Amino acid sequence: MAIRDDQTIRANWRCFVACGLMVLSPFQYGIDFGLIGGLQAMPGFLKIYGHPAPNTTIGWNISTVRQQLITSLMTLGAFVSSATAGVIAAKLGRKTCLWMACLGCVVSNIIMMTTTDINALYVGRLLNGLANGYFMTFSQLFIQESSPAKYRGLFLSAFQFFTSFGTLIGTIVDWATASRQDRSAYLIPLGLIYIVPFFLTIGLFFIPESPRWLILQDRIEEGRKSLEWLRPTGAPVDIEVAEIKAAIDKERELGGQVGVLDMFKNPVDRRRTILAVCAVTLQAATGSMFIISYKAYFFTMARVSNPFAMGCVLSAIGLFAIILNSLIVVRYGRRRVLLMSGLGTCGILQLIVAIVYDKNPGATSTGQVLVALSCLYMMSYNGMVATYAWLAGGEIPSQRLRSYTFGLAAAVGFFGAWLTTFTAPYFINPDSLNWGPRYGYIWFPSAIIAGVWVFFFLPEVQGRTLEEIDEMFEEKLPARKFRGYTCVRRLVMDEKPNAQHEE
């Protein structure tokens, strides 16, 4: 069967441009994580915010409390802003919220670059987190609501790709400036944070608002015009508008007014909320934030040679895994299988890392093994867990509650990330428990339990429109029956043969 002309990438080029602009948001988020973890292993940074430590490899260290707050305040801010996304989205569109994120990002970075006071740095990190929460939440909502079902998985793979690409760029810049002994060692990396808000602020003027958000606000004509811009020229957008409106009306009949508590009142909405929240939280269950946020510090304290270079290798390997993943997600689906495999692999690798270090800490051979296993871990995490966790969490919420449910899911995911980044210093810092890589003992059972949850509860919705997903949940199908179910409420657009589109 030939590919329909209106389903090709070329025909959907405007949608690719709009969603391509959206993936600058996770690039910003990734840069922040790539930078901050490295700053804490730089003498130029530690001379201002740390203390001398002759027993460490670089002669400097940072207190556990400061290390916790510098890293975790960003994720705490993201938790707060994501948790309020549903309330904000009831009045403000996706584009407006992204503009607010750009403003917050710039203000926070000005604070961080101009201060040498630790308390002002904390304020900058928290404000930066509030901005990043909006970046990650509203950009994904736009992609989920604007992209065709055929390419939604690809766009969200690109979303994770740019998160990791940002982390790689941040890590490389840290590596390039780490040897500087003055403030420029960390001011140069922080300067990168201005780039994305600049381009995103301008680019948002040239793309439409999310069509599903506009239709949800009863701005039907504006929603139709948005779809006309996003879809191929001549596409039957009126049918898609009718389908979206019918699904929203159906949900309104079931649930009435929209509010925070509506996520839990109706059994169907309650199930979708729980599934979305747990799906996004799968990322935290692997302990990934421990390695992503502290890789340079982690490698430094584990006496790995050239820790900044090894951090770059780790980020590059993760990026390569996402490229491989993008060849799978659109063609083959089976996200449940990939998630279970990824979670199991990540858990086992965390366990092996902990055992290897426990048996022979500080040895050169141990450091080499740690780097190799960490690379395998990042391949498994980025290739099979991270992308699919966000993807599942974004597709499952109902139309009318999408902002509330996905905002809650993102918030809980950020809370899990905050909990990891806040507690990790207690385990890995030599001034505290000094576990180092033994921290992996905690994450092995966590990842295995998450994989078991996926097997029993997470449905497969690859290739389905958001309206088809609504129908399957309303039918109260068990997770194992989603993949083979044939939807009966298909509109004429899907039922009627279209000869002119076939070769």
Image (cartoon, helix red, strand yellow):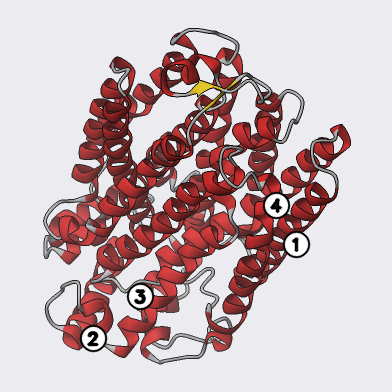
On screen, 257 above or below 373?
A: below
For label 2, the SS is helix
Q: Could you tell me which residue is drawn at 75 percent across and 31 percent down? A: 304
For label 1, the SS is helix
Which mark's residue is nearer the viewer, 2 or 1? 1
Kind of residue at disc 1:
Ile
C-alpha distance separating marks 2 and 3: 11 Å
C-alpha distance separating marks 1 and 3: 29 Å
Q: Could you tell me which residue is drawn at 70 percent across and 47 percent down? A: 437
Figure quadrant of residue 472: bottom left
Mark 1 touching mark 3, by CB under 8 A? no
Looking at marks 2 and 1 on the same chain, the residue that comes earlier in the sequence is marked by 2
Mark 4 touching mark 2, by CB under 8 A? no
For label 4, the SS is helix
Q: Residue furthest right?
A: 365
Residue 331 seen by the camera: no
How far from the left and from the top, in percent, is residue 105?
29, 32
Q: Which residue is mark 4?
A: 438
Looking at marks 2 and 3 on the same chain, the residue that comes earlier in the sequence is marked by 2
In depth, the one of 15 and 122 nearer the eye is 122
Q: Residues within 10 Å of mark 4 (few under 14, many from 20)?
A: many
Figure quadrant of the C terminus = bottom right
Q: Which residue is mark 1?
A: 348
C-alpha distance separating marks 4 and 3: 34 Å
Looking at marks 4 and 2 on the same chain, the residue that comes earlier in the sequence is marked by 2
Q: Residues within 10 Å of mark 3 (few under 14, many from 20)?
A: many
Kind of residue at disc 3:
Thr
